[in-house]
Amino acid sequence: MSEQPEIFFYHLERQALEQALPLLVEKSLERGWKALIRCGSGERMDALDTALWTYREDSFLPHGRDSEAGAAEEPVLLTTETANPNGSQVLFVVDRAATDALSGYERIVYMFDGRDDEALSEARGFWKEAKEAGHPLTYWQQDGGGRWQKKA
């Protein structure tokens, strides 16, 4: 594992977070990684909790909340805190959640709504901060067909 985790920026324009996040979490689980989803609010955590159970008719993502018994064993954990109770290798930062406490992960996935000017401004600020800290950075944006394209 590198000293500084790589940070992937996902610029949401064509899909809601509830649609895009489960697919990226699936890819993390396929790699054998545990995932921590750091939410900006309890309300967003509630919405994502439901989305992870119902995002596809034929599938769901096993997950829990950091406040539940057995949280440390969960492959995917929802939280509003900065701790990593399940030892995740990948951290998803969503809904303008805190961008501190990034060490100990292999990858950080920072997802932001490109239609929200404040979120866009915060993402730019975090990009600058992360670049200055020496993190390897990658920027992803959806094309017209909804596929993620590496832009930087």
Image (cartoon, helix red, strand yellow):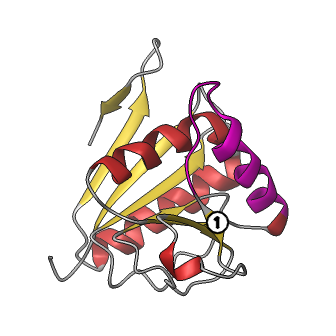
Q: Which residue is drawn at 67% across and 65% down?
A: 39
Tell whether 80 sits left or right of 91: right
Q: What stretch is highlighted in magenta?
A: 43-62
The picture quadrant where one finds residue 56 is top right
Task: Pinpoint residue 4: horizontal percent, then vertical percent.
Answer: 23, 78
Q: Is residue 8 above or below residue 148?
A: below
Residue 61 in the magenta stretch? The answer is: yes
Q: Residue furthest right?
A: 43
Q: Residue at x 47, y 86 (%)?
A: 101
Residue beneath the point at 54% across and 42% down: 22
Within-10-Å neighbours for mark 1: few <14, some 14–19, many 20+ = many
Q: Does the magenta stretch include residue 52?
A: yes
Q: Nearer the viewer, residue 96 or 30?
A: 30
Image position, residue 109 (x, y; %): 42, 57
- Residue at which label 1 appears: 64
Residue type beneath disc 1:
Gly
Image check: 21 left or right of 5? right
Instruction: Name which residue lies at 60% across and 80% down.
Output: 70
* Magenta segment, prevailing SS (helix, strand or loop): helix
Instruction: Tell me: residue 71, above or below residue 126.
Output: below
- In the rendered image, residue 119, in percent from the top left (x then y), is placed at 65, 54
Q: Which of 19 and 32 is in front in this view?
A: 32
Q: Specify whether 31 is left or right of 85.
A: left
Residue 59, located in which quarter of the rendered image? top right
Task: Give the camera-side residue of 148 and 33.
Answer: 33
